């Protein structure tokens, strides 16, 4: 299994973060018996001081560089990743994508319908590179803006409806797609440190959402013990 994390600022993380990618790496090491590798073109965190993805200051310096690999970027969404994903899947021979995108699209670039079309383009390009690719897609998790700005919140809800339909339409036995559940217990005040980006607790919840979907559908690893990791 060759896993590629694809995401926005919630996935790349910022200087001093563990990241949910780290939590997933820990979980797989503890529960998955099969061989796996984390792949991707990037390995750094976003550095707020430089406003660039140049930081190697993970909260755990023991997080090995080969496990830090990803395709995630601060301010990047489906719009940005769709043109890249085919080449990245091909180059790094990824066969499993864990994808958390959409909030930035809806906030700055595209409406729900346009964003859903970019999801379809993303999947098509990824499958052109790897016809038997499988993927887990996370719905947009409402942030503080979605709470305070009802039209934006409604757009997030609309996109999540379209994302569920897209996953159902496009999933095939040869190339299965899973829609992860919004993490149980996601409370903005506790799960984020600024209304959007995950706190240490939020990182565990995000990892748990992906791990739960993979375990239930594909028998990968085990259920994530998030409640015992407070």
Image: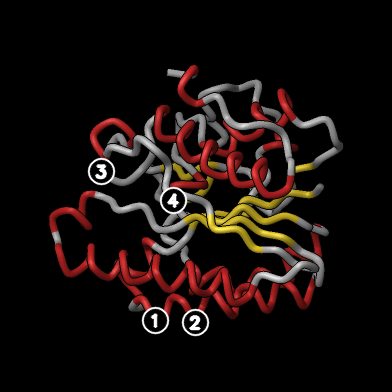
Question: What's the distance in space between the residues labelled 1 and 2, CA to CA?
Answer: 6 Å
Q: Residue at x 39, y 81 (%)?
A: 113
Asked whether disc 1 touches disc 2, contact meaning CB atoms under 8 Å apart, the reply is yes
Q: Which residue is mark 4?
A: 9
Q: Secondary structure at mark 3?
A: loop
Question: What's the distance in space between the residues labelled 3 and 2, CA to CA?
Answer: 27 Å
Packing grade of label 4 (10 A; few <14, some 14-19, many >=20) is many
Mark closest to the chain's N terminus, 4 or 3:
4
Packing grade of label 1 (10 A; few <14, some 14-19, many >=20) is some
Does residue 199 appear to the left or right of 73 in the view shown?
Answer: left
Mark closest to the chain's N terminus, 4 or 1:
4
Q: Residue at x 30, y 53 (%)?
A: 142
Question: In this view, which residue lies farthest toward the right?
Answer: 35
Question: What's the distance in space between the residues labelled 4 and 3, CA to CA?
Answer: 13 Å
Q: Which residue is mark 1?
A: 113
Q: Secondary structure at mark 4?
A: helix
Q: Which residue is mark 2?
A: 117
Q: Residue at x 36, y 52 (%)?
A: 141
Q: Which residue is mark 3?
A: 195
Residue mark closest to the camera, 1 vs 3: 1
Residue mark closest to the camera, 4 vs 3: 3
Residue mark closest to the camera, 2 vs 4: 2
Vertical relation: 187 (above or below) 72: above
Question: What's the distance in space between the residues labelled 4 and 1, CA to CA?
Answer: 22 Å
Question: What's the distance in space between the residues labelled 2 and 4, CA to CA?
Answer: 21 Å
Mark closest to the chain's N terminus, 3 or 2:
2
């Amino acid at each position: 299994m060759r896993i590629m994390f694809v995401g926005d600022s919630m996935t790349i993380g910022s200087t001093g973060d563990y990241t949910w990618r780290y939590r997933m790496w820990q979980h797989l090491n503890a529960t998955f018996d099969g061989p796996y590798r984390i792949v991707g073109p990037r390995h750094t965190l976003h550095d707020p001081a430089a406003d660039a993805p140049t930081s190697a200051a993970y909260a755990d310096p023991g997080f090995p560089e080969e496990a830090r690999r990803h395709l995630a970027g601060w301010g990047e969404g489906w719009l940005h990743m769709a043109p890249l994903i085919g080449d990245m899947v091909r180059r790094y021979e990824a066969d499993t994508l864990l994808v958390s995108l959409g909030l930035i699209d809806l906030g700055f670039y595209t409406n729900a319908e346009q964003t859903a079309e970019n999801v379809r383009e993303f999947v098509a390009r990824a499958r052109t590179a790897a016809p038997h690719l499988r993927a887990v897609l996370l719905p947009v998790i409402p942030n503080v803006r979605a709470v305070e700005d009802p039209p934006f919140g409604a757009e997030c809800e609309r996109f999540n409806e379209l994302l569920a339909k897209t996953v159902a339409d496009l999933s095939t036995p040869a190339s299965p797609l899973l829609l992860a559940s919004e993490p149980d217990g996601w409370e903005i005040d506790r799960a984020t440190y600024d209304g959007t980006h995950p706190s240490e607790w939020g990182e565990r919840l995000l990892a748990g959402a992906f791990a739960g979907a993979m375990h239930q559908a594909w028998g990968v690893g085990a259920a994530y013990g998030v409640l015992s990791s407070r």
